[in-house]
Image: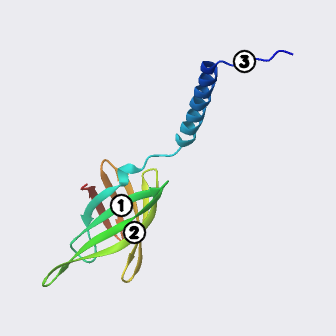
Amino acid sequence: MRKRRHSFSGVILRCLFLLALGTLAAAQDQAGKPDYSWLNGKWRGPAPVVGGSTELNLKVVSDNQVEGFEALERNLGRGKQTVRYPITGTVNGEIIDLSILRDRGRVKLQLKHAEETLTGKFGAEEVVYKKSQ
């Protein structure tokens, strides 16, 4: 029986080939995950019901899970007040489903992304948020 000797360069080439195959397989596994980084940042819009404006600070934290806060600016008779409320939600394609935990309970908001804006309805009112950062 003959013993086969492997040269050092042959072993290195085989290792590099296996490494390349592993990298290619990992890249194919991740290719199916959509990139929702366009949602990250600040979105400004109106504050229906309370008057004033609101800023949604959103970040996609894992796959399609969204977290952040709403900075709601209320118009009071003697000035303005800004209050922050936590946001959780999901993004699927161009549709963003948000849940905002305000003082009087949870507010659900479904928005659609198109051309650097998020649009949806808050009650009977149309709301439009524009990307500010």
Q: Quadrant of residue 76?
A: bottom left
Measured as percent of width and height from the top left, residue 74 is found at 22, 77
Q: Residues within 10 Å of mark 1 (few under 14, many from 20)?
A: many
Which mark is first along the chain, 1 or 2?
1
Measured as percent of width and height from the top left, residue 78 is found at 12, 84
The quadrant of the image that shows the C terminus is bottom left
Report the residue at 44% width, 46% height from top: 35
Which mark is first along the chain, 3 or 2?
3
Measured as percent of width and height from the top left, residue 79 is found at 13, 80
Residue type indicated by callout 1: Leu
The nearer-to-camera label among 2 and 3 is: 3
Q: Which mark is residue 5?
A: 3
Mark 2 residue element: strand
Residue of label 1: 58
Q: Which mark is residue 69?
A: none
Q: Is residue 12 left or right of 37 when viewed as pictured?
A: right
Q: Quadrant of residue 86?
A: bottom left
Measured as percent of width and height from the top left, residue 61 is found at 44, 58
Marks 2 and 1 close (CB-CB < 8 Å): yes
Report the residue at 83% width, 15% height from top: 2
Residue 14 higher or lower than 116, as above or below: above
User: Whole-Å distance between the Cαs marked 2 and 3?
Assistant: 63 Å
Residue of label 2: 87
